[in-house]
Image (spheres, grey):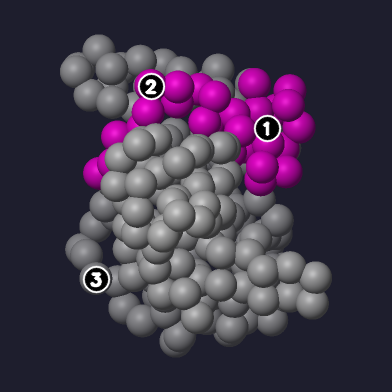
Amino acid sequence: MIAFVSGPVAALAPDTAVVEVGGIGMAVQCTPNTLSGLRVGQQARLATSLVVREDSLTLYGFADDDERQTFELLQTASGVGPRLAQAMLAVHTPDALRRAFASGDEKALTAVPGIGKKGAQKLLLELRDRLGEPVGSAPAAAATPAAAGWRDQLHAALVGLGYAGREADEAVAAVTPQAEAVAAEGGSPQVGQLLRSALQTLNRTR
């Protein structure tokens, strides 16, 4: 198993980072929030999980070991593959997921594309005791600032989660005031937070 990759970032795409390791470019699937902390040419260290299939080898990357462990634990539930587990981490931090399972919060789980009410109930039964207790006392905001093109990153993330281009456009427009308010105060819009807000907007319109 490849536990982590470390090296300069050679390229970035909406859902992938290429990290140069010993002269080899390793393509790593990442959430928008993880990608937002990376810069081409700068050093990066990503915790990783290798998913082996008959016809593919896919490396998933995470900001830290907690995210990777949560990613792997989520897949111990029936019906949860790596793509759905990654989608859950794109919407919620590991501690937010632990809090959701500990409190039986169906609404938090149905905010993830691909999880309906019945699916959320099933996941709560299966994973309630596997993820452990929340570490923090309150939901923590992601600390990593997004790159300047947050609109493109957010749009690509929504499309990657299965939303149509028109839906993604509307969701980006809906959270633009939130991002502009952060920028007006001298901060940087955080893609992870904006993605959560955008998904809530999309769920209300369905």
Mark 2, other Cα within 10 Å: few <14 / some 14–19 / many ≥20? few
Which residue is depicted at the point 56% across and 64% down?
A: 59
Q: Quadrant of residue 164?
A: top right
Q: Is residue 91 visible?
A: no
Can you tell which mark lies on residue 135?
Answer: 3
Give the numbered dot on residue 111: none
Would residue 102 be seen by someone viewing this image from the given angle?
yes
At x 19%, y 18%, the residue is: 186
Question: In what quadrant of the picture does the C terminus appear?
Answer: top right
Q: Is residue 121 left or right of 47 when viewed as pictured?
A: right
Task: Answer left or right for 10 relative to 206.
Answer: left
Amino acid type of the residue tagged 1 in the rendering: Thr
Decide: marks 1, 3 in contact (CB < 8 A)? Answer: no
User: Is residue 183 shown left or right of residue 97?
Assistant: left
Magenta span includes 182? no
- Where is residue 197? Give x, y as percent: 47, 36
The residue that mark 2 highlights is 148
Q: Which residues are magenta?
A: 142-169
Callout count: 3
In primary-sequence order, the first of circles 1 and 2 is: 2
Residues at marks 1 and 3, CA–CA distance in whole angstroms:
33 Å
Mark 1 element type: helix
Q: Nearer the viewer, mark 1 or mark 2?
A: 2
- The CA span between labels 3 and 2 is 31 Å
The residue identified by callout 1 is 205
